[in-house]
Amino acid sequence: MPGPRGLRPETRWAYLFLLPWLVGLLVFQLGPMVASLVLSFTDYDLIDSPRFAGLGNYAAMLEDPKVARAVGNTVIYTALHVPLAIAIALALALILNRVTGRAAGVFRTVFYLPSMTPYVATGVLFLFLLNGQAGVVNQFLGLFGIDGPQWTTDPNWILPGIVLMSLWNLGTTTIILVAALRNVPRELSEAAMIDGAGSWQRFRAVTLPMISSALFFVVIINTITSLQMFDQVYTMFFGNQSAQQSYGDSALFYVVYLFQQAFQFLHMGYASALAWLLFLVIGVITLIQVKVGNRLVYYEAEEQGA
């Protein structure tokens, strides 16, 4: 029976259990977001009181060459990482989907373990793996007579090296795609096989449409993650300021520059403006992906409802 205020007892309990999350959302997410929006219109250095600057921070971004370089590096990285990550994760998922029995769980765990590695540890690990003189990557290339580049010091190879490092962490995407492949109705593939469809035709006409919603999801998530790339890059290239001089801004990503403005130069107002610009860009890109994806993604429930 509803209580005196018209709420059922289980509803009141639900709100009670949700209260810690709601408080955390307000205090640690919505509150700081509103504060950063206000600060983005000020000149604030954490020492003196904020001074209103209007749209000055946003206008300064248009004239800041480092913003343009950081945006360029981030966009190039995203354009390279997302297609490669999805393609490799899908290939791994197709392989894992063929594994059955107890071995299936073992292999899924093995493929997912890299995702459990802290990003800072990953950055340190690949700083050694990509070393131009003694790195394992160049030693492997040497087996084929290839003289490997200076991945961590040559400005022309820093971005490709970062993309190569990012492909280490594909466990989450792979497991999501494995789950989607497991849900593809076997009878559809068997019917296509009876009709004479080959492996590629079955994959293109049956498997790909059935997992398109999962692919759509991982594309959006990987895009958002790529645009916020920070931990590994900062660990590899910005821990040693003297070494940074050798490659300039080749490893300068947008969030790295945002972090520098906020906590190295104490330009909190400018950093807040950078953060809100990133938020708006991610929102626009996600909206475009959703609009395009709704035309390409196959939703089985909608088909059944029709």
Image (cartoon, rainbow, N blue to C red):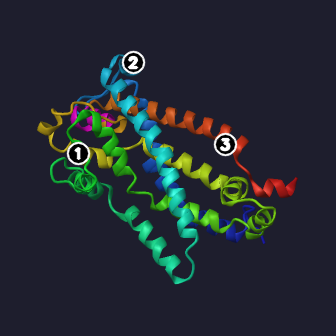
Q: Quadrant of residue 94?
A: bottom right
Q: Is residue 296 above or below residue 141?
A: above
The residue indicated by pointer 2 is: 62
Q: Is residue 67 above or below residue 115?
A: above
Q: Label 3 is placed on what type of residue?
A: Gly
> Residue 293, which numbered label?
3
At label 3, counting other C-alpha atoms closer than 10 Å, the crowd grade (few under 14, some 14-19, many 20 or more) is some
Q: Label 2 is placed on what type of residue?
A: Leu
Give the residue drawn at x 24%, y 42%: 149
Give the residue drawn at x 45%, y 72%: 109
Counting from the top left corner in percent of width and height, residue 2 is at: 76, 68
Q: Are marks 2 and 3 in contact (CB under 8 Å)?
A: no
Give the residue drawn at x 53%, y 69%: 96
The residue indicated by pointer 1 is: 147
Counting from the top left corner in percent of width and height, residue 49 is at: 28, 28
Give the residue drawn at x 66%, y 53%: 213
Q: Is residue 227 above or below residue 174?
A: above
Q: Are marks 2 and 1 in contact (CB under 8 Å)?
A: no
Q: Which span of residues is magenta-colored?
A: 257-266
